[in-house]
Amino acid sequence: MLVSETEGITLQATVPAGLDRKEAEVYQRLDPARLPKHIAIIMDGNGRWARKRHLPRVAGHRAGVTSVRYVVETASQIGIPSLTLYAFSEENWKRRPKTEVAFLMSLLSRYLKQEVPTLHKNNVRLQYIGRLHELPDFVQEKMEWAREETSRNTGMVLTLALNYSARSELADAFQSILKAAVNNGGIQHLTIDEATISKHLYTSHLPDPDLVIRTSGEMRLSNFLLWQLAYAEIYVTPTLWPEFRGLHLLEGIAEYQTRERRYGGLSESQSSRGLRS
Ligand code: FPP
C-alpha cells in the first residue's frame, strides 16, 4: 500500500507490489477498474536501437528480450489479464537474412528455457499464435515444454505471436470453418458469421485487445490481429523496443484511459444532447 498526500487530502491507492517509484506514480493516476483486459504490442525498433550504438542488429534483439521480461512482469503485477506480443511475423521469415532468422530462433528457444521460473513467479500462462508447425522442430519442442510447464498458472495469459500473419490467420480460420462443417454433416451446415469466425481464429482463447501499442513510431498495424483490433485504441510511442519498460506500458495505459471508446456509437455528451433535443 502506498499513500500519497495531495492538497491536504490523503489519497490511498493500492499500488501493486513490485512497481518502482516512477511506475507507482503513474499507476496512481490510473483507474484500476478500467485497465485494458487485453493489451497487444508490436515490438519494433530493435534494429534501430542497435544501429544507434554501432552494434549488430542481433544485439538489438538480445536487448529486446530484456524488455519482454520487464513488460511481462509489470503487466502481470498490475493485473492485466492478457498480453499478446508480436515476436515474429510470417514476413520476417521471408524478408530477413537467414542468419538473423536463425539467431531469432535460438534467442526464442533460450528465452523459453530461461523464462519459465519468472513466468511461474508471476503466475503467467504461456500461449502462442501463428503457423507454429512451420517453426523449426527444436523451437516447437521448447514451446510445447514451456506451455505445458506454465499451463496450471492462473494469472495473466501471455501469448507470443510467432510466424504470425493476420491474413494467414483469417485464411486458416475460413478453412477450419469449412472443415468443421464437413465433419458436422456437410457443407449445408456451414454458418459464417462474426461469432463463428472469432471462434476459429488462433485467438479464440482471448478477448479482443482493448489497446494496441506500437513502439518506435511507425503508424502501421503490419498484418497484426487485423480482425481482433477492429475497436482497439492505438498507442504509438517513439520509444524503441529495447528501451521500453513497465513505465512506458503504464504511460500507454494512462493514455488509453483518456480515450472515449465509442464502438461506432455517439459520445456520452452527444447522446445526452440528442435526448434533450
Ligand atoms: C522488430 O525490430 C523486432 C523483431 C522483428 C523481433 C522481435 C523480437 C524480440 C523482441 C526478441 C525475441 C522475443 C521473444 C519473445 C523472445 P526490427 O528488427 O524490425 O527493428 P528495426 O525496424 O529498427 O529494424
Image: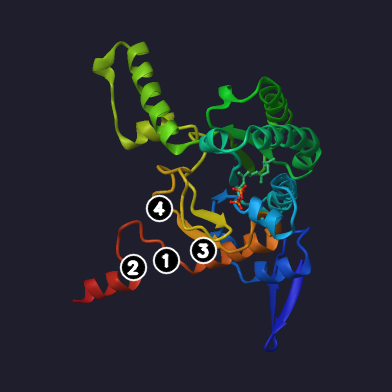
x 54%, y 37%: residue: 95
Callout 2 touching callout 3 (CB < 8 Å):
no
Give the residue number, with chain letter if any, for mark 3: 256
Q: Which residue lies furthest to the left in this view?
A: 277
Q: Nearer the viewer, residue 190 or 16?
A: 190
Q: Name the residue under label 1.
A: 260
Q: Is residue 37 left or right of residue 193?
A: right
**Quick one: SS at disc 1?**
loop
- Label 3 and label 4: CA atoms lie apart by 12 Å
Mark 2 vs ligand 1: CB under 8 Å? no
The answer to which of marks 2 and 4 sits earlier in the sequence is: 4
Report the side of 131 relative to 158 (left or right): left
Mark 1 and 2 residues: CB-CB less than 8 Å, in contact?
Answer: yes
The kind of residue on which mark 1 rests is Glu
The amino acid beneath tag 2 is: Ser
Residue to which mark 4 is pinned: 231
Helix, strand or loop at mark 3: helix
Categorize mark 4 by other alpha carbons within 10 Å: few (<14), some (14-19), many (20+): some
Question: In front: mark 2 or mark 3?
Answer: 3
Q: Give whichever of 17, 113 is nearer the camera.
A: 113
Write the residue at 68% across / 63% down: 247
